[in-house]
Image: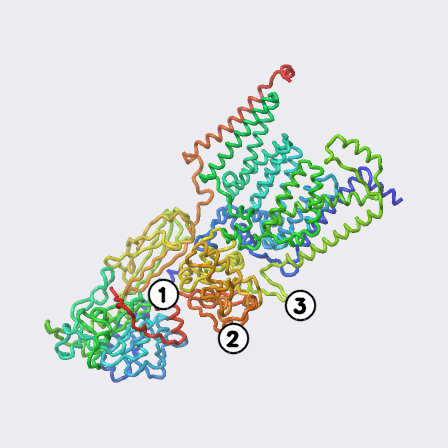
Amino acid sequence: MRWCLALLICCFLAAVNALSSSGSRLLAVLEDTEQKSLYSTLWADLEARGYDVSIESPKSEQLSLFKHGERAYDHLLILPPKSKGLGPSLTPKHILDFMNKDGNILLALSGKSSTSSAVSSLLLELDIHLADDRSAVVVDHFNYDTLSSAEKHDVLVLPRPGPLRPDVKAFFDGEGVLALPRVAPQTLGSHSTLVVPVLKAPATAYSYNPKEEMPAAEDILATGSQLNIVSAMQARNSARFTVLGSVESLEDKWFSASVKTPRGEKTSTVNREFAKQLTGWAFKETGVLKVDKVEHHLATEGAELNPSIYRIKNETVYNIEVSEYVFDKWVPFEVPGEDELQLEFTMLSPFHRLTLQPTSRTETGTVFSTKFVTPDQHGIFSFRVNYKRPFFTNIEEKHEVTVRHFAHDEYPRSWAISGGWVWIAGLWSVIGGFLAFVVVWLYSAPVADKLKKTQ
Amino acid sequence: MAQSSLDVLLKGSSGRNTRGLLRVIILCTIAAAAVASRLFSVIRFESIIHEFDPWFNFRATKYLIENGFYSFWDWFDDRTWHPLGRVTGGTLYPGLMVTSGVIYHILRFLTIPVDIRNVCVLLAPGFSGLTALAMYFLTCEMSTSPSAGLLAAAFMGITPGYISRSVAGSYDNEAIAIFLLVFTFFLWIKAVKNGSIMWGALTALFYGYMVSAWGGYVFITNLIPLHVFVLICMGRYSTRVYISYTTWYALGTLGSMQIPFVGFLPIRNSDHMSALGIFGLLQLVAFAEFVRAYLPGKQFQKLLTAMVLLTVGLAFSGLVLLSLTGVIAPWSGRFYSLWDTGYAKVHIPIIASVSEHQPTAWPAFFFDLNFLIWLFPAGVFMCFQKLKDEHVFVVIYSVLASYFAGVMVRLMLTLTPIVCVAAALALSAILDNFLVASSPTPESKAKANVEDSKSLRSTRNPVVGIYSYFSKSVVACSVTLYLLLFVAHCTWVTSNAYSSPSVVLASKLPDGSQFIIDDYREAYYWLRQNTPDNAKIMSWWDYGYQIGGMADRPTLVDNNTWNNTHIATVGKAMSSREEVSYPILRQHDVDYVLVVFGGLLGYSGDDLNKFLWMVRIAEGIWPDEVKERDFFTARGEYRVDEEATPAMKNSLMYKMSYHNYQSLFPSGQAVDRVRGTKLPTESPQLNTLEEAFTSENWIVRLYKVKDLDNLGRDHSNAVAFDKGLKRKRTAKKKGPRVLRTE
């Protein structure tokens, strides 16, 4: 019933908008409205993909992320402000509340000016760290654009990132190079499991504050690939927060600029494609997983669907249908390379952890299923699919079922157990013997006078 | 004219009929009085199930009514002991539920529309009437005096020792078990007296019923063999004993094994070995008797000694061997605690933590039995005077039951019937002698002496008589006075001590009017109406049955206490820091935590007062993580105020109890009225739980377990952020940086 409803709603949603899986209202926060024209290609691209882009200044009076306690926008794009903070309606608390209500955020930083302390403390809550003085820039003497920063080496020229690990799907890869001018680097804390790097700086990069005359060697934030140019954080409710280190890379100028590395040829950048990939991911156009339906039942023919009670040692089948959203449509989900979608059958701890195999495919989803025997332990178990991977929205399906003991009439009968034959024979021999004894006793009365003598 | 008509009524066969009729009327009146005196709680409060265990029995009965007998038999309860569940159908004594189910269906069949709750509430009073009747039969077997039975029935009907477990609403196993106990003993006495298979079989039948109703059946299982053993030792072996015992043992054991909870215990558990042993012994004795009839005396003596030595040696070594190999289960912990009252406290805190398992205080005997307790020895003495088979039974029963009642408060219940029998014997002897208007004649005295001169002097019945009307009237008056006082005492005790449902508390306002404190039900109904149907509630096990019964929500632990580790887990969660408790709560899918806090009202039965038991039980499983010592100050005090130990102040239980409590008082003046101490100025800070509900008088407090933080932060950090505290940038860490490897 529930998944029927979910399916209906999904169909409805698909009809209404042809883009992000979670709404089209995009708020871009931009301090100078004159700067709007700098990013005209970006706005045009976004609007072409179906977003209702509204551009507001953080100082604006009527700017509010919430209306009547609900989100007023689905997505938020924050371009770096010049002033100290983002204003009274975009405090870190508001922004986190926005995320807690499933809003997605793309935050762009710039190495040109120092980042505001409000942004820094916001990032700190997410375990993303900026340099202490908040005005560092990534410099790389090997991968810079010789045309635009021949001296400062602060326009990085990098290929697009491949997959993070062999078992993670790559959302940002492709041909071509990116030009990333004046990147504000981020490092990721080691506590949070929710943050992932999207684009790491090359091993030869380091962070450097151009305002300081002499960089102190001990004060270096981080070097090499510990520095992130683009990093992402996905909350437990799958709301996305993306940090882009270089806001200039989104400008029209860099969308179609030509760059040249010290070693390489002169090539044009693919910043525009990358911007599409990045905003697409950040605003949930890609990497969105959806569970269409979950079915479990006994492995026998005509068994009841999704029963609430099983018995120990029942053979059980579990099916889950998963779809993935790719830009404008749901497609069958395919588990990336070395990864596995797993089912756990848990009570306190997993009794089974099984790989779900794709068995069939519908128009929009892949059905994964497995078959197993419930453990010899009664209790309240749950079918649990806990699939949390970088860049994919979280799947956390938990279905509680009761596993009961054998009922009194479900054991095999005594004569069906060969070991019981001894006892059955004993039982009947006693009964037979007793009957025989009674018969002998009744028909063997001693002769009357003999009895008198003995007495 | 009047004289003669009275003569017609009182003499001859019509006199016998009149007395019979009178006896029936008196018994009916006694039964009515027994029922009526148990209705205080229904009249004062309402028709409500009391206390803790009855709520489970009530819930089980409802399940039986709704789902039928077989699904009750196979019931797997997934709403208790989450996530383990409980094989309820196989781990309960179904007698009580089945009894009320049968009554319910009979009433429905007679087209009397009755609510199952009312059947359950009134079952105990109804059966107490039957108990009085059974008592009459039992005592009549002991004495020739017709008044003894009636007195015993009256005593049994209203003595507080029995009322304490059988007021209306006290829907517990004991409600029917005491009737079955008394009636089984009556049938046993009857069987021994008559040596009849029929009475033996009836004993077995009621024994089976008793087994299905109450774990206290073990008392019968051991008392009857002991009776037989003593009879054999006294040289009173007879075919009567043989027939009645073997019939009872064979049928009764088979019957008891039909109850899934008992199963193979009768042949595997040490508690039941005496019955089996006596069964074997009886066969040997019977065989010896048989052989004696055919052998000359001297050879028989030799044979007998050899046989006795052989069998004793064989049986003993067999028992030891089977016990060591584990075929026969060792004595259960509850059994040990019967002999050593300190045993439970050291080894099984879960048993010791129950107040009704504590040793009895001496005043309790007088409180529960009033003047019966000092008539009791007199009655036992009189049994020694006659000392027939049934009197031996009374003597053994009184000795055993007195001991047990001294060890455990709740076993007062098994002592009560025999006290009533003995006291009735004593009192009826007094009344029979002193309430006779005519003086004894010397001839009858002489005749009696001649008859008795052959028997032992100690057993000779000296014939005495009371000649003075003065002494007769004094004794009669004082006995009447005692009886009246007894009735007054019983009524007072019943009304004041035993008629509180304990779900609802009553107190008096300064102007004398009654003030009902209904916090428990308020909180349970809040749970029922505001939480999802399968929200898991964690509380200390005392409240498990009530939450299951009234709030209808799954619980982690309840009063069944079958899994000590699970209870210890809850104890650990309650007594540890939040950082330790939270993963436990998450692992067990806990949605709400319930604590009982009496600090505002001065309600002393709250969780903080039980807290040390939680700590002890948790320490039994995790001695390294939870330590009782940490909850006492350096001077060995258990404190909750400013000087409470850090372990105490950081424990989840402390935080939940006092969360926001300080806000009720002007700053710095918060007082705990149970512990009588001033509290710290600062209210404890809860990070992983949030307050969901607090009842009117703050007795029940409910907390919701927070989900993991959406942004992956610690709860303490998240709470600090929400409060507007700025997070300090992690200061320069010492040592090398921790690098991320992706």
- Helix, strand or loop status at disc 3: loop
CA distance separating discs 2 and 3: 33 Å
* Rendering coords of residue B613 (x, y %): 50, 58
Task: Tell me the chain of label 1.
Answer: A
Front of the two marks 3 and 1: 3
The answer to whether residue A18 is seen in the rendering is no
Which residue lies most toward the front here? B635
Please name the residue that numbered disc 3 is placed on. Answer: B513
User: Are the residues tagged 2 and 1 within 8 Å (C-beta)?
Assistant: no
Other residues around mark 3 within 10 Å, as few (<14) / some (14–19) / many (≥20): few
- The quadrant of the rendering that contains the N terminus of chain B is top right
Q: Which kind of residue does numbered mark 1 sit on?
A: Ile
- Give the chain letter at badge 3: B
- Kindly report the distance in space between the C-alpha atoms of the residues bearing marks 2 and 1: 55 Å
User: In the image, which is nearer the foreground, mark 2 or mark 1?
Assistant: 2
Going from N to C along the chain, the mark reached first, 2 or 3, is 3
Q: Residue B400: percent from the left, percent from the top? A: 61, 44
Q: Quadrant of residue B389?
A: top right
Counting from the top left corner in percent of width and height, residue B327 is at 46, 39
How was the colour assigned to the protein in this rendering? Answer: rainbow
Is B427 rendered above or below residue A455?
below
Residue annotated with mark 2: B668
Secondary element under disc 2, as helix, strand or loop, is loop
Q: Residue A234's x, y, as percent?
A: 31, 68
**As drawn, is B472 to the left or to the right of A117?**
right
* Badge 2 and badge 3 in a common chain: yes
Left/right placement of residue B350 relative to residue B437 reads: left
| Disc 2 chain ID | B
Give the label on residue A9, or none: 1
In the rendered structure, which amino acid carries the disc numbered 2? Gly
